[in-house]
Image (cartoon, rainbow, N blue to C red):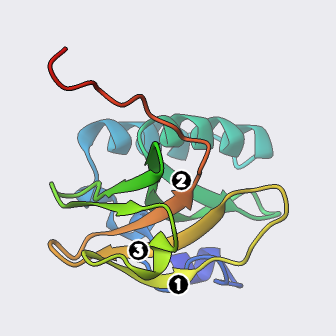
Amino acid sequence: MSSKERNSNPLKIKNMTDLFDKIESLPEKVQTILNEFALKDNSYSNCAELLRLMEAEGYTFEYGLDAVPYGLVRKVKVEVYGHDIFVACPHCNNSEEQSGDEQRHHLQVFEITEWREDVEGQNELSEMRCCCCGGEFLLEWDYENVQECEEDGE
């Protein structure tokens, strides 16, 4: 079943490939998780458990009232170091660090292909494409994801 058949309202993933349609391209561990889930009944509890397992591997998806998952994508969070943000491609070694002021408008090595609709109480999300490898991923603008800065010479 294709992602279009699974999702009659493809509002959420507009410009990204649904990785449920390319399972063979995923890491072996992720394929194993998906294959084990495929043997289970479609239920909210099974979808919630699959989502928990997939998020631990750096992926996310959505599911509808029919409890059928759709829109599987890679997901990363912005890392915050002091007043700077850091974005790394989950597919290659490409990364970028920018000042925290208006950083979204100044990204040089990542293309923002779509801003997700804001949901109150949640971090902003954007669909991204790496200008180096072409890899797609979902970026969570989590400004609370503060990382410790390593001191030089220690």
* Horizontal side of residue 38 vs 106, given as left or right: right
**Separation (CA) of disc 1 from disc 3:** 7 Å
* x and y percentages locating residue 14 in the rendered image: 54, 85
> Disc 1 or 3, which lies upstream in sequence?
1
Relative to 139, say whether 1 is above or below.
Answer: below
Marks 3 & 2, CB-CB < 8 Å contact: no
> Disc 1 or 2, which lies upstream in sequence?
2
Q: Residue at x 41, y 39 (%)?
A: 57
Tag 1 residue: 114
Q: Residue at x 75, y 73 (%)?
A: 118
> Hey, which residue is sitting farthest top in the picture?
154
Amino acid bearing label 1: Glu
Q: Residues within 10 Å of mark 1 (few under 14, many from 20)?
A: some
Q: Which mark is residue 128?
A: 3
Amino acid bearing label 3: Met
Is any atom of residue 132 visible in this view? yes
* x and y percentages locating residue 49 in the rendered image: 65, 35
Tag 2 residue: 60
Q: Nearer the viewer, residue 106 or 154?
A: 154
Quadrant assignment, res 28: top left
**Separation (CA) of disc 1 from disc 2:** 17 Å
Q: Residue at x 39, y 70 (%)?
A: 21
Quadrant assignment, res 70: bottom right
Amino acid bearing label 2: Thr
**Labels 1, 2: front one:** 1
Is any atom of residue 1 visible in this view? no
What SS does tag 2 mark?
strand
Image quarter (top left, top right, bottom left or bottom right) of the C terminus = top left
**Separation (CA) of disc 3 from disc 2:** 14 Å
Q: Residues within 10 Å of mark 3 (few under 14, many from 20)?
A: many
